[in-house]
Image: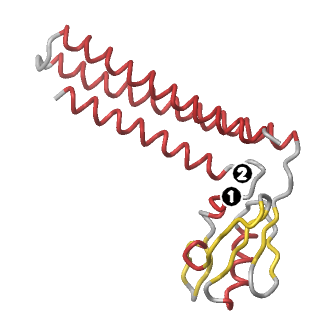
Amino acid sequence: MPESIIKKGEEKMVKTIESMKAEFALIRAGRANPTVLNKVMVSYYGTDTPLNQVASISTPEAQQLLIKPYDKSIIKDIEKAILTADLNLTPQSDGVVVRINFPALTEDKRRDLVKEVKKHSENSKIAIRNIRRDMNDQLKKMEKDSLISEDELKKHNDEVQKITDKQIENVEKVAKEKENSIMEI
C-alpha cells in the first residue's frame, strides 16, 4: 500500500516536469521553433482547428518558420490566427505559403526570458514539494490507522525525500539547459 502511494506521487512529479518542459517549448530561444505555434487555432470552415492540423510547419532557416496550408483558401485565416494569438510574431504571405521571421533576441529580452524560465521552474519545484507533502500525509495517516509501523513510516518518508530530491534536481537541470539555450547567441 505505501508503495502505491509513493509510485503515484512519483508519477505526478514526472508529469509536473513534463508540463514544465511543455511550457519551456513555448518560450522561444532566438531560433524558429514550430512549437511556438502549438496553441494557435485557425477558423477552418467555422471550426477552431489547431494550426498544425490545417498546414505543415517547417523550419527552412534558423530564424524562419514556413507554414504551408493544405487548403490555400485559408491563408488569410492563418495570418489572422497568428496575429491574434499574441505571440509578437508577424506573418508574411505570398498567396501560397506564410513565412514568419524571428528577429534576433536582444540582451534585455534574453534576460526577461531567463526570468520567465526561473519562474516556471520555481513553480514546478513548489508543485513537487506539495506532492511530497501529500505523500507524507498519506503515509502518516496509514501509521495513525496502524497499517504501518513507525519504523516503516520513517523508511518510506526517507524514500519520498530521495525521490523528491531527484525530481527537483531534474527540474534544475532542465531549467539550466533552457537558460543556456536562451543566452547562447
The residue beneath circle 2 is: 28
Quarter of the image where the C terminus is located: top right
Question: Residue 18, percent across and down?
Answer: 48, 44
Up/down of 46 relative to 50, above or below: below
Up/down of 10 relative to 46, above or below: above
Question: Residue 38, percent across and down?
Answer: 60, 63
Quarter of the view holding residue 152: top left
Up/down of 104 relative to 15, above or below: below
Q: Residue at x 69, y 82 (%)?
A: 77
Sequence-wise first label, 1 or 2? 2
Q: Secondary structure at mark 1?
A: loop
Q: Nearer the viewer, residue 87 or 180?
A: 180
Q: Nearer the viewer, residue 85 or 110?
A: 110
Q: Residue at x 72, y 35 (%)?
A: 180
Looking at the image, what colour scheme do you see? Answer: secondary structure
Side (left or right) of 70 relative to 112:
left
Quarter of the image where the N terminus is located: top left
